[in-house]
Image (tube, helix red, strand yellow):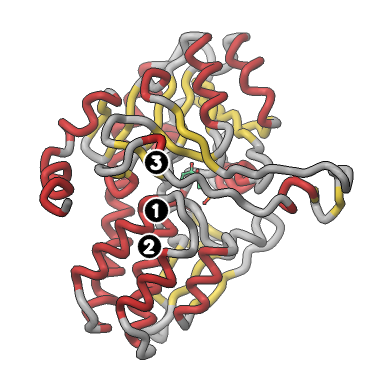
Amino acid sequence: MKVEGRWRRAIELADDGRSVMVLDQARLPDQVRWLRLAELGDVVRAIRDMHVRGAPLIGAAAAYGVAIALRTGVALDDACAQLAATRPTAVNLRWALDEMRAVGADPDAAFAAAARICDHDVARCEAIGRHGLALIRAAARPGRPVNVLTHCNAGWLATVDWGTALAPIYKAHEAGDPLHVWVDETRPRNQGLLTAWELAAHGVPHTVIVDNAGGHLLQHGEVDLCIVGTDRTTRDGDVCNKIGTYLKALAAHDNQVPFYAAVPSPSIDWTTAAHDIPIEERSGDEVRFLAGVEIVPRRSPVANPAFDVTPRRLITGLITERGVASPAGLAAMFPDLTERAERAR
Ligand code: MRU
């Protein structure tokens, strides 16, 4: 996608061939700053402190983290253990580390594998864009743009390119289909502002709303469909995503508005049940402070669960790289991957 007039990916191999450049998402949307990750510790910090974030991008960064670690003399198991401990919920992290473990300890092979993981991520997201475009077109009503509501940031910043939930939106915009995006602010980390930044850069009409506004807009016919991303979707089609997704799905269901999740296959956990998904509990300071100002009374405790699970009964469909599946039909769409997961048990 275009950053300051140049086509870039959210993660790129640096010119030295031994480190990677990532767009620093902790600085966006105020500043466009690229970070060089040259050692395992840089990659661990970047993921843990959310300079890189979004499930597919976390996977891609971890893959390069393994390659960088091997090149600098860190053992494969040690590198994987450190990277696995960075963030608990996005299953793409575990998936990428499993892929890298299978490649082995040769640094050249590991760099090639990490590059492949990135290229495949781009291809998957692009395919999700094509399949999702048909859903946007199906929701069109004469004489007005299609209004899509999205939560968090599941755009190209959260992946290597294209995004998951935003890929169909970019495809529709590219094709000249009139559309408008409602962007949930997504407190407390405000990933919606990253979505707004991306959409603005591409000229996609959008409006930022506070997280509590979605129900009202859904009730008043202002939303034609919802598309969100996922950090982990179970084989049964339950969707774990950024906190607040569940409430949007409930409100969409109550108002008969289609609710889709964009699910690349590395975001599917074939073995863990919904109630066993580890939900990241982040620092309470993210809630307590707003733009550096303490807004919560000192004596009041805060809680900060970062993800929730939307049960499949609230989900209209899952947009995968192979097509749109009903939640109950997800496993049937990926017989090869379900079989592989069974064998690995
Ligand atoms: O905590 P984050 O910002 O890493 O959250 C993950 C997400 O970006 C979202 O939950 C997203 O919808 C899934 S990743 C495409």
Q: Is mark 1 within 8 Å of ligand 1?
A: yes
**Disc 1/disc 3 C-alpha distance (Å):** 21 Å
Under tag 1, what secondary structure?
helix
Residue 93: x, y in percent? 38, 58
Say which quarter of the image contains residue 199.
Answer: top right
Residue behind mark 3? 276
Q: Which mark is residue 36?
A: none
Q: Which residue is mark 2?
A: 60
Tag 2, which secondary structure?
helix
Which residue, given by chain and number where applicable, does mark 1 sit on? 56
Earlier-in-chain disc, 3 versus 2: 2
Answer left or right for 144 relative to 299.
left
Ligand 1 within 8 A of label 3's CB?
no
Type of the residue with mark 1: Pro
Q: Residue at x 50, y 78 (%)?
A: 41
Label 3–label 2 contact, CB within 8 A:
no
